[in-house]
Amino acid sequence: MRRIANVLTLAAAVVWLHACAADAPTAPRPNPPGGGGGGGSALQILLVTSNANPEAGTCTLIQATVTLNGSTVPDGTSVNFTTDFGTFGQNGLPLISVVTQDGVAVTALCGPGSGQAKVRATATSAGQTGTANLTIVFQSSSNTLPFVSSCSPSFGPKEGGTVLTLTGGRFFGSPATTRAQFTVNGVTKDGIVQSVSENQIVVLTPGFPEFASPGLQAQITLSLGTNQAQPDVLSLPACFSYGAQDSGTPVIASLLPASGTSEGGTRVTIVGSGFSTASGVQVFFGTLEATVVSVSFNQVVVLSPLQVGDPTPVEVTVRNIGNGQVSNGVTFTYTETMIITGVSNNIQPLGGPFSPMTIFGRGFQAPIAVSLAGWAAVIQSVSATEVVVVPSAPIAQGCGDITGEIEITNLNTGSSVDGSSFTYVVEQPVITDVQPLFGLGGVQVTITGINLPDNVADAEVKFGSQFAVVTSASSNQIVVDAPTSILPSPVCIPPNDPPDPQTVASVSIVVTDRATACVATSAGVFQMQLPCVAPPPTPTP
């Protein structure tokens, strides 16, 4: 677990700021506030994020809800996430595949610095394929950058022309240096920026009459200082929708995550619109009231309450305290506490190649991080009862096996579970043959064996106490130039005549793998030779 630090450090830094952070429901069906989606396929993907403008060096959760003809896809449907900036927290790569549970797949995107990430989710079920896109902008510093705290109004006609007021802070520039782009179902159009002050930006919305859906979610990308080399950019995926709805009524578009353990304490971001920041809100999981952590115009962050009894789904609702209006209900599923019941393929060679292994249990919920004997694994899929991972290469610690616990950590709640063990097996090198068995210095010697160092940099070969020059290396064969003996030249023994080669020592060949410190020895196998010299003249009486 110690060596999973890079993943967990990023994961632990997931923050929930006041900046616009939300999702985008898919079209063409009528949409509540949300994020990216679209296309005419019967398979639709709703993408949401816990924070569309996280700080650089942190992570933000991303959830894909997948439906086919209006119904959730079967559990185990693979959702492929890709990004052109940053990496996903589970595997440290710019792409990951996560399987659905109750139609939902969750991952975490981590940004190494400031920049804009375009996230794409793709899924296929019953021959239908759907995609959705979401823009996330990692900010260099939330303390000095502009932010949006409210959008008014939240809805307007598809023909455009709505005067939209973005209220926030630290705005700068003029209408000429400010750009507001509206993206609907993959089509992007510019709004007309009418005025810019320190706390407000007024934009005239463009029209999207070409779309037939009565409700369309717009993702707004707001750029300030377009005359600068690096403008400040904000992503507002749940700021404005085309359609008609009472903005005084709270509306839930999605929960992120949509499940958590019955122990409670899961940090849940409720994405939507119409949440009252003035009078506050109450959030109920069924009949139980949750702890409200923060409220903004398009999201409420809560801690789920403890559920007593067997885990069951409940309806989550939001009530605006000021006017008493109650939102629609969205299902949250309580799950069992994480437990590992068994594993497969949990003994693998230290140097690879590595093959997928399955961890069996209950209560698994993406996004998670997995460590095997203290080393981070690459996650291939997560379901409620199975996690499939591929081990990553550890750093060898002497010529011995590395054995340790398997640990799974839920990146959303921070809870973890240990169980079973995993072993990286060091495959010991063995010398099976040496040819030739004798020779002068510089002679080419081929050492055959198994599990030998597979590259020249890791292969160290000695003839006795002297190093040989390694010219090529593979796992079953190493070729070296034998060293020249440091012993004095021998006196020729008949029938040898100068400068015939003659053995001066029988030495052991020792092969050391610098990567693992493992050693293979063939004792006294090689006869080192030198040209012999004539015996000294016999003294005359």
Image (cartoon, helix red, strand yellow):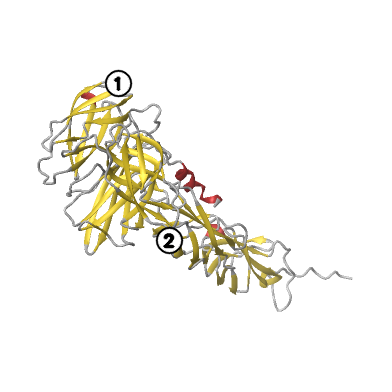
Q: Position of residue 330 (x, y in %)?
A: 30, 49
Q: Secondary structure at mark 2?
A: strand
The CA span between labels 2 and 1 is: 49 Å
Q: Quadrant of residue 510?
A: bottom right
Q: Quadrant of residue 538?
A: bottom right
Q: Position of residue 389 (x, y in %)?
A: 44, 60
What's the residue at 54%, 66% (across, down)? 479
Q: Which mark is residue 198?
A: 1
Q: Earlier in the sequence, mark 2 or mark 1?
A: 1
Q: Which mark is residue 436?
A: none
- Let me know if residue 318 appears in the view: yes
Q: Amino acid at mark 2?
A: Val
Q: Which mark is residue 387?
A: 2
What's the residue at 18%, 51% (across, down)? 39
Quarter occupied by the C terminus:
bottom right
Few, some or many C-alpha atoms within 10 Å of disc 1 (few <14, some 14-19, many ≥20)?
few
Q: Quadrant of residue 143?
A: top left
Residue that sits furthest to the right in the current view: 541
Q: Is residue 213 above or below residue 239?
A: below
Q: Position of residue 241 (x, y in %)?
A: 20, 38
Q: Position of residue 386 (x, y in %)?
A: 42, 63
Few, some or many C-alpha atoms within 10 Å of disc 2 (few <14, some 14-19, many ≥20)?
many
Q: Is residue 504 above or below residue 157?
A: below
- Let me know if residue 529 appears in the view: no
Q: Secondary structure at mark 1?
A: loop
What's the residue at 24%, 25% (across, down)? 201
Relative depth, front residue between 92 and 256: 256
What's the residue at 43%, 64% (across, down)? 356
Q: Amino acid at mark 1?
A: Glu
